[in-house]
Image (cartoon, rainbow, N blue to C red):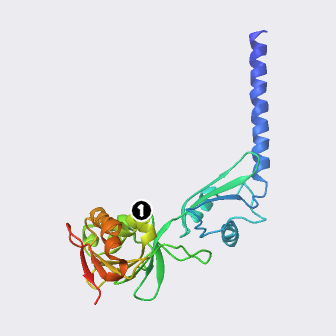
Amino acid sequence: MKPWLRNSLWLLFFITIGFVMSFVKTSQSERVVGIPEISITMYEDMLFLTKEDITQRLLDKHLIGEEKTYGVMELKKIEQYIQDMPEVKAAEAYTYVSGKWMLDVELRQPIARIFNIDGSSCYLDKDGKLMPLSLNYTAHVVTVDGNINETDYGKSVDMIINNDSLITIEILDDLYEISNYVCSDEFLSSQITHIHINGYDEFELIPRVGDQRIMFGEAEYIPGKFKKLEYFYADGINRTGWENYDTINIMYKSQVVCSHRD
């Protein structure tokens, strides 16, 4: 084949491909967006947000609808809107050449429910951030009450520990350290159901079995204190019986101090 003919054929091929791609793009941009396929990733059964909730919020915000086409759809805006929902940890929006579009949504995992002094309530999640309660689901996590009043959802544990002035006055970072340790341990998560913060900003734990108050103290030497408690449960308290103690004090670094009931 002569060079000029071969070059002409290649040029015609590229022109044809460009025309087809332009036609496909134009056709795609004129298609109505419609309802996305939604995939939700959650921890265990903690469904704080349903597919129907997400769809309705997008409709209410006019980010999708009968008049919306792919040519005017703002994927990044939709993605950011979902990402900003208080129940959501991460979100991604993307389309296929076929015209189908997807939303992948990962929900947040609470580790504690806080009952504030002012009567309000919220969750503390696995990433150290506050999140509001949900109308769809109530998480069965350790509860917290006492000298605490966390209502600023813009606050996070990372923000506190990276601020020298906040870390000395805030209690949220200490609460996170203790509740996250409990949540991550199979034995402790089944045993410890409630955390009380007393007037000295010391932590007191309430177990599921028995009627004792565990005096934990400040949020320091956390693994060591809980290890002492586990040893005591495995050995000491089984010998003498649950009913004999009203407090178990693990505040001190090298010992467990118990007080007997009257």
Tag count: 1
Q: Nearer the viewer, residue 93 or 28?
A: 93
Q: Position of residue 131 (x, y in %)?
A: 49, 72
Q: Position of residue 200 (x, y in %)?
A: 25, 83
Q: Nearer the viewer, residue 252 or 34?
A: 252
Q: Position of residue 53 (x, y in %)?
A: 67, 70
Point out the image quarter for the N terminus. top right
Locate residue 94 relative to residue 258 in the image: left or right: right
Residue at (42, 84) in percent of width and height: 116
Residue 223, compared with residue 209, is above or below; it is above
Quadrant of the image occupied by residue 208: bottom left
Quadrant of the image occupied by residue 202: bottom left
Q: Nearer the viewer, residue 88 or 76?
A: 88
Residue at (78, 25) in percent of width and height: 12
Residue 97, compared with residue 129, is above or below; it is above
Q: Position of residue 118 (x, y in %)?
A: 42, 89
Regarding mark 1 in the picture, which secondary structure is present there? loop
> Going by the picture, which residue comes out furthest to the top?
2
Locate residue 203 relative to residue 185 in the image: left or right: left
Locate residue 102 relative to residue 115 in the image: left or right: right
Point out the image quarter for the C terminus. bottom left
| Label 1, residues with CA under 10 Å away: few <14, some 14-19, many ≥20 | few
Residue 74, compared with residue 210, is above or below; it is above
Which residue type carries mark 1?
Asp
Q: Is residue 127 something that shows in the picture?
A: no
Q: Is residue 169 something that shows in the picture?
A: yes
Residue identified by numbered label 1 = 185
